[in-house]
Structure formats: structure tokens, C-alpha cells
Image (tube, rainbow, N blue to C red):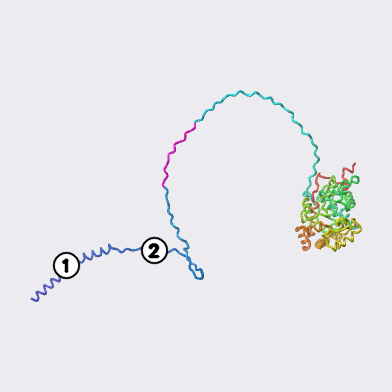
Amino acid sequence: MASFSFLTSLLAALLLYSLNAAILPTSQGLLAAAATARRPHTVPPPPPPPPRRCITRVIHGKPRTLCAPINPPPRKRRVVVPPPKKKVAVPPKKRAVPVKKRVVARPPAPPTKIRRVAPRKAPVIPRPSPAPLRSNGETLTNDYYAHSCPQVESIIRNKVTAWVKKDRSLAASLLRLHFHDCMATGNDASILLKDPKGKSTEMYSVFSKGLRGFEVVDDIKLAVENACPGVVSCADVLTVIARDVTLELHGPFWFVPFGRKDSLTSHINDAAQVPHQESDANTLLKQFTAFGLSFSDLATLTGAHSVGKSHCFSFTRGGAAGANPRMNATYAQALHEKCKRGPWEEVFNDEDTPFLLDLEFYKNLKRGNVLLKSDNSIYVDNNMTSSLVDAFLTQPGMWDAQFAVSMVKLGNVQVLTGRQGEVRRVCSVPNSARHQ
């Protein structure tokens, strides 16, 4: 009986095991399939923030950190596509039919008779012969007389030395004579022409009073004519004389270009164009500019007043009555005593070195110890000329170099060349008058 119950329990256990083995795979497969079908919902991670740059600033006493993206991403713009346009059919244009104009034939007009009138002849007005065109020495050359008269400069040099040895004051007078000739109508030797009867040439002008040295020029010209007849002009002779008297006054040397011709006439009114001792710096500058000279030439050539003499009437008012009020008071009183004899009394321009071309004139100019009003004006009334005066006194050798340059320019002012003039045989008379 006991064994029977044991077997019964064993059979029941086997039956239960077989049932579980048949059912379990199916249920586990279903559970796995259900688990696979129901996947959990995953959220994509947010995009990383754009890179930013931060700085710290103290605002109202508290530190603040301010950040801003370095390169902010561009915003997407909404693109709006316009609807397509409807095509509208345009009817073709109708061509205009040309209208034929009615042409009416008109009878031809009767021919008109043309009356011919003889043209009137214009009256012939005699015109004066034009003045010769002048130049500023563009065609002049240093070797102009190299073949025709090579010894001309040595002849003039020896003659100048001999004359100045006799009278030292002639050096300044001949230099002034050359200046007056150039500043009247140009360097044409017109100042040398004489007119004893009519006295209508530049030589007899009131502005030419005090000029001297005419006999020296005539003597030197005669020596040149004996060596080279009819070759060297009086204008060239006077220009070389001015250079050589500068050497006698211990001034600089320069090469003289040649080829000038002498004028055929001379007029007394032309002498009024020469700068006057009563003119101011601005008036003088206009006169110099008209001849192609500059303010530096004005300031430089005025330094030639370091030599020579002046008459009392040229720097006093009413003869010896009173001096220019711009003068130094002590200097003016000394001049007043010297000019008591009359307006034609002569006074040295530079009492210290009256026969030397040096810088003493400019030193006296700064002190107010100069004779002429025009000289005083270039230092008082014009900044350009006064600055040059200061430069001459502070830079040794500057005035000598500039004086040579300015004298060459002065000698080239409005010269006559070619057939514009003539070569006078005698400087005081034109060639045409010698045969009358």
C-alpha cells in the first residue's frame, strides 16, 4: 500500500514536469517579442552651444562678466517665391499708312538783277616800325669772341687797372654806370649816347645826374677797336668793365657771356625807369621783377652801395635841411653837419671801408646807419629781403657767390642780339650819325 502511494506521487510529478516544458517556451517567446516591440522613447541630445567670448568689467563698483558668441550662426531667411506672372497677349501694332501730300507746282520767280558794287579800299595807315624784340641773354655765349677778338678781356682788364690806379673812386662810378644802363631799357649801351644839341638822350636826364666814367668807356673802346675793329659792342665792353672794377674793389669774379648789340637810339624819358633812392622795397621789387630779376637780386645788388659816394640831395629833404627820419639819430646829425655846404656835397656810402665790396654795408643797414631811404626799406619793409640780409651776415661767402650770380643776370637783362642792334665804332655816337 505504501509503495502504491509512492508511485502515484512520482507519476504526478512527471506529468507536471512535462506540462511545464511544453508551455514555458511559448510564453517566454511571447514575452521576449513583447519586450522587443516596446522599445523605450529616446530624446536626441541638444546641440552644443556656440563658442563665446567673455570679458569681466567693473560696472558701478561690481565685477560683471559679459559674454557674446564669437561667430553667431546666421539666421535662416525665409525665401518667398513670387507667383509666376501671367502672360498677357499684346496685339501687334498697326502700321501707319503714309499720306501722300499734294504737290502744287508754283511758277518760277523772275531772276533778280544783282548790282555789283566795287569794294571800298581801306585807308592805308602808316605803322611805326616795331621795337626790336629783346631777350634775357639766352643766345649769349662765353666764347663769342674766341676767334674774332680773343684778347678783348685782357685789353679791358689792363685798361681798367690803369684808370682805377689813377682814381680809386672811378671803380664805384663805373659799376653804377653799368647798373643805370641795364635798368633803363636793358643792357644796350643806350646810356652812353650823347646829344649835345638837343640833350634828348638818357645821359641828360635828371635821374642820370652824378653819373661819371664816360671818358673811361670811350678810351677802353678805342683800345678794343684798334685791336678788333667793328667786332666788340659797347654793351659788351661796359659789362666787362663792371666785372673788372668789381675785382678792383676786392669783389668776386664771374665769367661774362658775350654777343650783345648796341641800341640805335636813346630817349631821355627811359632813364626814369631806374630805381630811385626814395622808393620803398615793394616798389623796387616791382621794378626788378619787370626786368626778370628777383627779391634776392634786389637784396644782393643793393650791397654794391658799400662803395662810392652819394650827394646830399639824394638822402636829405630839401638839401641840408633834414635827413631821412628812419636814419639813426646820431648818424643823421653827423650827416646834417656834413651837408651844410649844400645839396651837391658828397658823402661816402660806407665810412669804414669806402673802397671795398664787403659786408660792412649790411652791418650798417641793421644799425640804421645807411644813407638812402631805399636801402633802409629792404630791411624794414620786406621780410624776404630782410631775411637775406641776416643770412649774408651769418653765412660767410654767401653774398659773394650771390653777387656774381646777380651781376650775370643784370648784364643779360633785355639785350639786343643779331640784327636788332649794331656794333658802334664810337660808344657815344651811333654809326649812322658818324657819316652825316
- Mark 1 Cα shell of 10 Å, populated few (<14), some (14-19), many (≥20): few
Depth order, front residue of 70/193: 70
> Splitting the image into 4 quarters, where does residue 317 fall?
bottom right
Tell me the residue that label 2 is attached to.
Answer: 46
Is residue 245 in the magenta section?
no
Q: Position of residue 142 (x, y in %)?
A: 80, 52
Mark 1 or 2, nearer chain start = 1
Q: Amino acid at mark 2?
A: Pro
> Splitting the image into 4 quarters, where does residue 285 fall?
bottom right
Q: Amino acid at mark 1?
A: Leu
- Res 91 visible: yes
- Mark 2 Cα shell of 10 Å, populated few (<14), some (14-19), many (≥20): few
Please state the extent of the stretch shown in magenta in the rendering: 83-96
The residue lying at 90 percent from left, 60 percent from top is 338
Position of residue 336 in the picture relative to residue 398 (left or right) = right
Q: Position of residue 398 (x, y in %)?
A: 78, 60
Whether residue 192 is situated above or below residue 120 in the rendered picture: below
Tell me the residue that label 1 is attached to.
Answer: 19
Whether residue 59 is situated above or below residue 285 in the rendered picture: below
Is residue 85 in the magenta section?
yes
Depth order, front residue of 311/252: 311
Quarter the C terminus occupies: top right
The residue lying at 59 percent from left, 24 percent from top is 106
Position of residue 189 in the picture relative to residue 107 (left or right) = right
Per the image, label 2 sits on a secondary structure element best described as loop
